[in-house]
Amino acid sequence: MSAKYCLLVCFIFILFLSCFDNKKNNTNTVSEFQQDEGNSSLEIVVAASEVNEMKMFINNNERRILERNLEIDFIAKTNFGIPGGDNWIVRLNDRTIIIYAINDEGLQKRYGTGSFNLLEHSAFDIMQNIPGTRIGNSTSSFGDFNEDGIDEIFIYGFYGAGEYIVIYGYDIDKDTFEKVHCRIPFQIISLDNGPAPVEFMTYNGMYGFKVFFYQLEVAGGPGWVPDPNPKNGKWIFYTWDTSKRRYVEIGEVVDE
């Protein structure tokens, strides 16, 4: 065997080891924040060790977990624009969603909301085309839906008074995290066959989403005769209004 041949074999072997090590190192990093192109404020790549460390920290400091013997079934680093530390979102196995701002000194801010399990409300996957990062098996996701560089939480809400599309966001002036962006009544056309009652889209040059609108009537007393909402059973389009800081209704989506 010639010296030149031996050198070639050694070079190939070293190159193989280098590629293997790189692949191995890459498996120790996970993306906890990935969204569809055009709907992402920031892709946050988080080391698995950081996620595990934060999960342990929250397990040891969240009173709800300690008092009720709960578990975290979803955790991710986010960008809700909450000052005071890194933003994290957690979903517990009692369906509670909690948002934190955490720094080296500990937990600085905490906000909470509820969520809903998908299969309890629809056999059809109504979340399949909702942009952002889906939160476990819930009817919720988080992402930059209004393209302002900050994340929000989208929720299909199934309440006693009706079903509503709710988008939560952080209000830095009030230091609150609440459903200030929209609260729109909807209906699932078919629980088995869909389609999803919300579709994010560009319509007449505006980016937003259409909702299969349906508002339940509430009785107004003896002799009251309901007056059906004229928008019921129609696809209504909404877009983000920067000056009003909320989603505004544009009108019925008309197919060309």
Image (cartoon, rainbow, N blue to C red):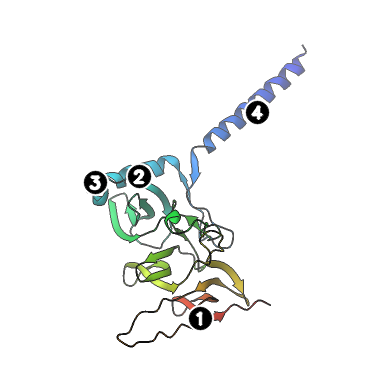
In terms of image quadrants, where is residue 199?
bottom right
Q: Amino acid at mark 3?
A: Leu
Front residue of 75/253: it is: 253
Mark 1 lies on residue: 231
Q: Residues within 10 Å of mark 3 (few under 14, many from 20)?
A: few
Quick one: label 2, few (<14), some, or many (20+) residues within 10 Å?
A: some
- Rendered position, 223 above or below 135: below
Q: Give the CA separation, mark 2 to mark 3.
A: 13 Å
Question: Which residue is at 34% across, 49% downward?
Answer: 93
- Tell me the element at label 1: loop
User: Gap in Å between the C-alphas at discs 3 and 1?
Assistant: 46 Å
For badge 1, the amino acid type reads Lys
Is 67 situated left or right of 200 in this image? left
Name which of mark 1 and mark 4 comes first in the sequence. 4
Q: Which mark is residue 66?
A: 3
Q: Earlier in the sequence, mark 4 or mark 2?
A: 4
- Identify the mark at residue 15; answer none if there is no mark: 4
Dot placed on the residue nearer the N-terminal end, 2 or 1: 2
**Looking at the image, do the residues carrying marks 1 and 4 touch, with CB atoms under 8 Å apart?**
no
The CA distance from mark 2 to mark 1 is 44 Å
Q: Which type of secondary structure does the marked residue at label 2 adopt?
A: helix
Q: Nearer the viewer, residue 167 or 252?
A: 252
Q: Amino acid at mark 4?
A: Leu
Residue 31 percent across, percent down from the top left: 50, 47
